[in-house]
Amino acid sequence: MMDSRTGPTRWLGNSVVQVLLALVGLIWITPLAGLLLSSLRTERDNASSGWWTSFLDPAQLSFDNYTALLQDAGLVQAFWNTVLISVPTTLLVVVVASLAGYAFAWLDFPGRDAVFLVVVGLLVVPVQVGLLPVAKLFGTVGLFGTVAGVILFHVAYGLPFAVFLLRNYFAQIPREMLEAARLDGGSEWRIFLRLILPLGRPAIASLAIFQFLWVWNDMLVALLFADSGSQPLTVALQSQMRQFGSNIGILAPGAFLSLVVPLVVFFAFQKHFVQGVMAGSVK
């Protein structure tokens, strides 16, 4: 017979968990709300009082800072540079890793396992190790200080994890499905496009989100490989911080814009992100 206290105890436990989660969410979102409200206040208001005072005086809020931001040619160009770096990098990593993951999972070729071990070994190589050698190489071939150079560096360092993730995910697809497709006369390209890609959508989507967030928020690589004409928004904002006391009206909306884009992308596809990482992390 079920204990009569089970129902109230479970309800109390669920309520405590929900309250704790709400508090964690509130703590997590407070800096974002503060940045948003600061970006909507004037420099004078931000200097004289905290952002929370705008709840008592909503007249402080306006979009004048964002209007000024759109008139700052340097920051606008930096935003588009960020888009030009993040989107092609994400597409290249997803396409190349999908092809390589399928090859390592289901195609037999000489040295397959040895090459895959090399790819896995590259996961432990820190980004900092390759900064100077690659910078010298890019300087020799004329890619240093360009958007293409930043993209190539991100692609090179993003591929080992991407290949590892997709190979493990694709390897879980039942062999019988691929054999049936081959018996029906399907070529490897057709199997890859019509079978592997649809079944691997959760892992591919999670990889795309992970890669996009990493590149969008990167500053280290861009700080070294990008010049003033190709620098992304993170580097542009960092350079603006040298004059923080006199340009917070530009910094706050720029920082919020840099933050909100990856947040929107993540929350829009978080279901695929969790499913893909959990399924592809182990076999």
Image: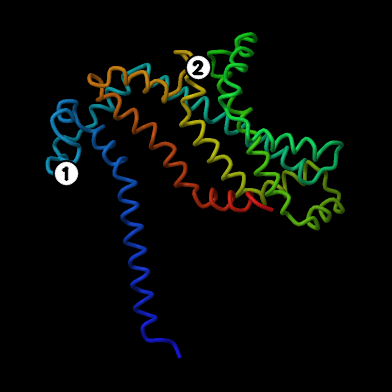
Q: Is label 2 or label 1 in front?
A: 2
At 85% from the left edge and 53% from the top edge, which residue is drawn? 184
- Residue 180 is situated, as x and y percent measured from the top left of the image, at 83, 56
Left or right for 228, reference 24: right
At 47% from the left edge and 22% from the top edge, which residue is drawn? 81
48 vs 168: above or below: above
Q: Which mark is residue 38?
A: none
- The image quarter containing residue 68 is top left
- The image quarter containing residue 97 is top right
171 vs 40: above or below: below
- Residue 58 is situated, as x and y percent measured from the top left of the image, at 15, 40
Residue placed under numbered mark 1 in the picture:
55
Q: Which one is in front, 46 or 122? A: 122
Q: Image quadrant for the N terminus?
A: bottom left
Residue placed under numbered mark 2 in the picture:
226
Left or right for 155, reference 256: right
Left or right for 172, reference 134: right
- Residue 45 is situated, as x and y percent measured from the top left of the image, at 15, 30
Q: Considering the numbered disc 1 on the image, is that residue within a helix, a strand or a loop?
A: helix
Packing grade of label 1 (10 A; few <14, some 14-19, many >=20) is: few
Packing grade of label 2 (10 A; few <14, some 14-19, many >=20) is: many
At 72% from the left edge and 38% from the top edge, which residue is drawn? 99
